[in-house]
Image: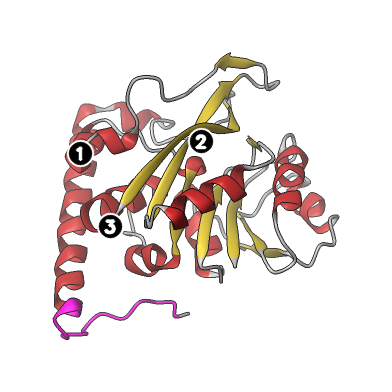
Amino acid sequence: MISVCMATYNGERFLNEQIDSILPQLSLYDELVISDDNSTDSTRDIIKSYQDSRIKFFHNEQRKGVTHNFEMALIHSKGDIILLADQDDVWLPNKIEELTQFLTKGDYDVVTCNCALTDINLNIIQNEYYTNKSPIDKSVWGNLVKDLWLGCCIAFRREILLATLPFPKKAAAHDLWIALYSQLHFKCGYYPKVLQLYRRHENTVSFAGGKSTHKLLYRINYRLYLVYHLLIRSIIKKNNRHGNLFHQSPIQG
């Protein structure tokens, strides 16, 4: 079973295009799990209009922010393989099939693909987002300093979900947390083919989106915060492996 997990917030402008690009790629047994962060536009109405049993919709009464909104979608997912979807991109027709086959045939735990960078109208402005170096070409510490991972391009096994949830309370980028932990403890692979259109516009949410994240002190402190939690979670993983099961994941199955 495949779960595509999407976080939405005031996404009415592009949401139909993205959902329409994902649903045809899902089987009757797969799911599109959407967590909405208390949108004030027509996002919820758009989602409900599909009346598709594969769409599992959850609504936050109070805003959680992008990272923990994604966390809510992931918590409610049931798939053996999980993909993350942004609300404003467009997936090419064979993305799910090709990326999941690459993951399973290569016996990877986490994989990421390439994408084309577009403007707001999906005009391609860069044929390949990754041109010289992919996230896999950098060490975990290299990505910690200058992150190349894009959450919208990755797919991973459920084991990764169980290992990385819950997200650290102050995590500002869900994909970076998943990626760094995975690089430390799991087998990661890169599929160089472009499998989606990555739309950039004035309302795009990113780790560097807020003014505070531009401050050097914040960036240093945040990375130290991630290192601390990576070390703590790694110690928990080591103890679990040796039978000292003092940690239990918040989701099972």
Amino acid found under the numbered disc labelled 1: Ser
Q: Earlier in the sequence, mark 3 or mark 2?
A: 3
Residue at mark 1 to residue at mark 3: CA–CA distance: 13 Å
Q: Residues in magenta? A: 240-252
Query: Dot 1 lies on which element?
Result: loop
User: Which mark is in front, 2 or 1?
Assistant: 1
Are the residues flagged by discs 1 and 3 in contact, CB closer than 8 Å?
no
Residue 166 image point, x, y percent: 37, 66
Relative vertical location of residue 77 with respect to residue 7 in this rendering, above or below: below
Residue 149 figure quarter? top left
The quadrant where residue 192 appears: top left
Say whether disc 2 or disc 1 marks the residue closer to the N-terminus: 1
- Per the picture, the main secondary structure of the magenta-coloured stretch is loop
**Residue 109 x, y percent position in the rendering:** 37, 57
Which residue carries the number 3 mark? Answer: 186
The amino acid type of the residue labelled 2 equals Val
Report helix, strand or loop for mark 2: loop
- From the image, tell me which residue sits under label 2: 205
Residue drawn at x 69%, y 48% as measured from the top left: 22
Q: From what the image shows, is residue 122 above or below residue 36?
A: above
Q: Which residue is mark 1?
A: 139
- Cα distance between the residues tagged 2 and 1: 25 Å
Earlier sequence position, callout 1 versus callout 3: 1
For label 1, count other residues whose C-alpha is less than 10 Å away and answer few (under 14), some (14-19) or many (20+): few
Q: Nearer the viewer, residue 43 or 26?
A: 26
